[in-house]
Image: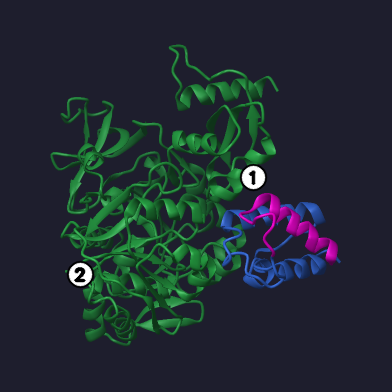
């Protein structure tokens, strides 16, 4: 879990509007904090699919699964099983 | 008549009818009108003053916007998807003393951001009004001005398009005629409402007394759910359709009961049209063309002609006259290339605080669009590119020279060139070619672009070159840059 979370934070630091030194809580909303936009979310999704060799069906593309570090980490853990 | 007066009219005639829906909440015309009054009452002692409107894209934003109209002040929506840096550029250019914002955006942007304002009004989600400070100053504005929309606030000098009540109502009525919008229609607003296209969806559906389902494009499942909840007219920029078409089965299910799939903000390509037609043959596809300077719409392509004429913008919307002018401002004949010009009640008052740019843009009542075009024998108009070097990136109008300057001024680099490249979802994205300086680090350029430019301007790749991409006659243009890029790629 911790590893996945760190991977996603690294990805966001390199590819989103997030600053290197800003802190992000596990339940912060990525869209409301302006860290990522709709195209950015799709690119993040493609990155996750490739990195963890999973497929994400469109009905999982919800705020619960994609708008926070916690949601993303949980979803990957579930799908990668 | 002002746009918000239509809401009052429907609040009287059909108070129970739904005006706006967002997620699980919805609001009737009667309640919407009351809430607008509540917010407007705190603005009434301002006398035609500029108000920045900073709110997310939902019902709350629409209430604030309408309250600024109702108090006879001037609304200047700030596109929240832009980085802080770009918003500050708009604020610097627009000389705004007052801001009305949501509590969510107030806490997101923080107190420092709001320091520049003399008046700060914060609206919470239950529409209670908090006045953090208030100072009424006399402003000297165009008497007809009610809305300022910014066209290119991302880089370079932002330009504020000044619109009047007459502009907004005229364009809303034209759009209502083209799409045959009635009070029974549910429109989908999933694109940004802070720009011309989104704003026109709000105006046309509220003037028709219909309802709008408000969402955003962040989460694909939520968008499909919104459409499935009963949308009769869906609106998207081409990239909206590209994103949704990644899920063809769900697209088919969601769009089965949609009447019209309308588009604007960029040309629909044949591939998108073909895919939609195959999945949902009964949906009418209706591409539209326009500019912020024309409030929103100028032309539309009737859905029956989409197959044959998708590479054209079709014909003028009712109330607008389009023509193609040669270099001497005479109407050009069929098939001759010239500049597309337009006239009608939807043409802007001018650019905010910029008379010279306004006079160059509107000459003898004709809006010069900057688009090169030709008239076809059947009267339809085909676009042939831009007079200037403006390009569409992810359906946003971008001046590549401004982007280049902004990167050069803020980084250790000698020269930067923006290259438009293909992107699966956005249609066009950018790559950069740079001539490095002693301290150039490519990774730092990437970081700068990610943090300081909007997402759609993040470069796909950065290539280092050692000479200027000049054309044969020694000039630098989009064309010479693209040719150099192809040359560099071929030799890699």
Rendering colour mode? by chain
Which chain is mark 1 on? B
Chain in blue (letter): A
Q: What is the magenta segment's predominant secondary structure?
A: helix
Label 2 resides on the chain identified as B
Residue at 66% across, 21% down = B490
Is B163 placed above or below A33 here? above
Colour green, chain: B
Query: Please, is residue B314 above or below residue B143 in the view?
Result: above
- Residue A4 falls within the magenta-colored stretch: yes
Q: How far apart, in angstroms, are the residues tagged by discs 1 and 2? A: 44 Å
* Disc ID at residue B47: 2
> Residue pushed farthest top?
B472
From this viewpoint, is residue B8 visible?
yes
Q: Does residue A50 appear to the left or right of A31 in the view shown?
A: right
Q: Would residue B65 be found to the left or right of residue B171 on screen?
A: right
């Amino acid at each position: 879990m911790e590893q996945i979370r760190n991977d996603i934070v690294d990805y966001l630091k390199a590819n989103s509007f997030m600053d290197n030194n800003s802190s992000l809580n596990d339940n912060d909303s990525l869209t409301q904090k302006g860290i990522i936009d709709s195209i950015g979310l799709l690119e993040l999704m493609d990155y996750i699919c490739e990195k963890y060799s999973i497929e994400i069906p469109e009905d999982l593309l919800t705020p619960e699964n994609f708008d926070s570090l916690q949601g993303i980490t949980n979803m990957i853990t579930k799908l990668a099983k | 008549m002002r746009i918000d007066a239509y809401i009052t009219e429907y609040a009287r005639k059909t108070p129970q009818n739904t005006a706006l829906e967002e997620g699980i909440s919805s609001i009737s015309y009667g309640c919407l009108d009351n809430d607008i009054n509540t917010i407007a009452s705190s603005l009434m002692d301002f006398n035609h003053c500029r108000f920045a409107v900073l709110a997310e894209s939902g019902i709350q934003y629409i209430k604030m916007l309408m309250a600024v109209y109702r108090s006879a002040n001037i609304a200047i929506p700030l596109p929240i998807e832009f980085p802080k840096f770009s918003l500050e550029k708009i604020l610097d250019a627009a000389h705004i003393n007052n801001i009305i914002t949501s509590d969510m955006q107030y806490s997101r942007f923080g107190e420092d951001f709001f320091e520049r304002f003399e008046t700060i009004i914060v609206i919470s989600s239950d529409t209670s009004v908090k006045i953090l400070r208030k100072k009424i100053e006399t402003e000297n504005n165009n008497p007809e001005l009610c809305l300022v929309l910014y066209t290119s606030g991302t880089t370079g000098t932002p330009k504020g398009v000044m619109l009047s009540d007459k502009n907004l109502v005229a364009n809303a009525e034209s759009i209502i005629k083209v799409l045959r919008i009635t009070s029974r229609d549910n429109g989908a607003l999933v694109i940004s409402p802070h720009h011309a296209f989104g704003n026109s969806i709000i105006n046309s559906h509220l003037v028709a007394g219909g309802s709008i389902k408000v969402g955003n494009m962040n989460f694909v499942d939520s968008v499909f759910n919104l459409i499935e909840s009963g949308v009769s007219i869906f609106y998207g920029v081409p990239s909206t359709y590209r994103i949704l078409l990644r899920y063809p089965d769900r697209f088919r299910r969601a769009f089965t009961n949609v009447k019209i799939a309308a588009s604007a903000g960029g040309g629909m390509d044949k591939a998108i049209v073909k895919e939609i037609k195959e999945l949902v043959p009964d949906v009418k596809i209706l591409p539209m063309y326009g500019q912020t300077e024309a409030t929103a719409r100028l032309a539309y392509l009737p859905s029956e002609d989409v197959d044959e004429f998708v590479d054209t913008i079709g014909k003028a919307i009712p109330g607008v006259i389009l023509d193609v002018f040669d270099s001497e401002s005479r109407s050009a004949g069929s098939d001759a290339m010239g500049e597309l010009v337009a006239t009608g009640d939807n043409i802007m008052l001018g650019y905010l605080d910029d008379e010279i740019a306004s006079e160059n843009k509107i000459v003898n009542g004709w809006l010069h669009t900057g688009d090169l075009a030709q008239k076809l024998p059947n009267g339809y108009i085909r676009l042939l590119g831009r007079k200037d070097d403006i390009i569409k990136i992810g359906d946003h109008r971008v001046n590549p020279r401004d982007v280049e300057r902004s990167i050069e001024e803020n980084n250790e680099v000698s020269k930067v060139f923006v290259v438009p490249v293909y992107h699966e979802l956005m249609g066009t994205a950018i790559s950069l070619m740079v001539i490095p300086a002693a301290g150039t680090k490519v990774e730092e350029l990437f970081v700068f672009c990610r943090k300081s430019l909007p997402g759609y301007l993040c470069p796909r790749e950065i290539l280092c070159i050692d000479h200027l991409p000049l054309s044969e006659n020694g000039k630098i243009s989009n064309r010479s840059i693209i040719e150099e890029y192809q040359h560099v790629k071929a030799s890699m």
